Amino acid sequence: MEDKKIAIQVRGLEKIYKLYDKPSDRLKESLGFSGKKRYKEHYALRNIDMTIYRGETVGIIGTNGSGKSTILKIITGVLNPTSGSVKVKGRISALLELGSGFNPEYNGIENVYLNGTMIGFSEKEIDERLEEILNFADIGDYVYQPVKTYSSGMFVRLAFAVAINIEPEILIVDEALSVGDVFFQAKCYHKFEEFKEMGKTILFVSHDLSSVSKYCDRVVLLNKGVKLGEGSPKEMIDAYKQVLVGQYPVPEESEKLKESNEGEKIKEQEGPLEEEGGNLTNPDLLEYGTKAAVIEEYFIMDGEGRKSSAIIKGQECSVHMSVHFLEDIPAPIFAFTIKNIKGVEITGTNTMVEKAFLEPVTAGNVKHIVFTQKLDLQGGEYLLSLGVTGYENENFQVYHRLYDVLNLTVISDKDTVGYYDANSKIKVLDGY
């Protein structure tokens, strides 16, 4: 393609953060004190090249901490790169941190003009789009009230309406299509499809692989700040699945990012979860029970026999736990439950329901329990809980329970309605 058709060009892009052990080290460096280096370097991005042509919809996928949001912020000017260059040809509207330019003391309409002006529109151009923006937001007379009085839902609706209705040449989206209620989300996706049909350039970051597969012409895969590859949505989604289970051949540059200048490991995943043998365990889990029996080991295994918290939708997987019995128990019940991140119990079972184990166990024994199932959950993040319970003289006893102990990520490129996929077979026939 000719250079004039390029919308975004990224060359040799790098972003390095200095990590200090304590605030005083940062202060000493800022004051120019000489001596040893007081920080470690963390590469959020390393040597990224990427070209996006006009009219393309390009997706960026990768695990948490791969640099997806960082590269979008550099392209939109929110962050400055450490090195490299970014060239943008066309007016950008970015759905990144919605409402970040709003003044809480201004009412909705005043903020529409403020935000539009910041993006680069004249008052006349905003006048022409005002009605469409307000109709899209659909928050009624609240547009005349200060936005500090808005609910979070109303605030996001107005911010999204401003960003999506200014007819940019380039639209940059970072997980923003999941805002508001289900009806507003449908409206957002419809607008997104309109942009694509109009031949707008779209750069799209999402964990929703179904949307990436549906909308994107091309996909870029990042991992630990390094570009692993680019290609068709199917090719890159398949590669992403390999990354999640540790089976993708990692370039030498990506391996270097595992260590800082001091040789210390950089965490691959931020947040409260810790990685243990391919599973993400929760250090802040809730546990209780008499401890007459104790769950000492637990993990999830994928259909290939690997310990992994990432399971491909429709794949067979197994939940494992080892239980050490410290007392005689007449009829232990072993159980697991899967919840979504909102705490809703989605599914689960136990050995009593399944009539899989109805025997007494004596003190000193260890039992390893394996629950095997085909996982047809919709793509997303889930939490796994485990338990050992039983009945003694008709009284229910909890010996050991571990709530939200493991993270489970279901990878899907086709999500249907609800929690589970019914795997419907569809025929469309002529006539009655």
Image: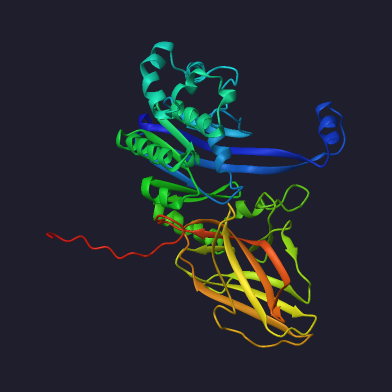
Residue 115 appears at what percent x and percent y?
A: 51, 20
From the viewer's side, name the closer residue of 253 and 367: 367
Position of 344 compared to 258: left or right? left
- How far across and down, in percent of the image, does residue 277 sit? 67, 66
Of residue 131 and residue 281, the one placed in the foreground of this image is 131
Placement of the C terminus among the 4 image quadrants: bottom left
Above or below residue 22? Residue 115 is above
For image coordinates 63% across by 79% down, the residue present is 369
Q: Quadrant of the N terminus?
A: top left
Q: Residue at x 62, y 73 (%)?
A: 335
Residue at the limit of the structure toward the left, as seen here: 431
Left or right: 260 with respect to 101? right
Tell me what residue is drawn at x 59 percent, y 63 percent: 309
Is 249 located above or below residue 92 in the figure? below
Residue 101 sits in quarter? top right
Seen in the image, is 396 located left or right of residue 291? left
Question: Residue at the top extreme?
Answer: 124
Q: Residue at x 57, y 27 (%)?
A: 100
From this viewpoint, is residue 63 visible? Answer: yes
37 vs 208, nearest the viewer: 208
Q: Pick out the residue farthest to the front.
A: 394
Answer whether residue 88 is visible to the viewer in this image.
no
> Which is more toward the observer, 82 or 393?
393
Residue 157, position as x, y percentages in the image? 48, 31
Marks counted in the figure total: 0
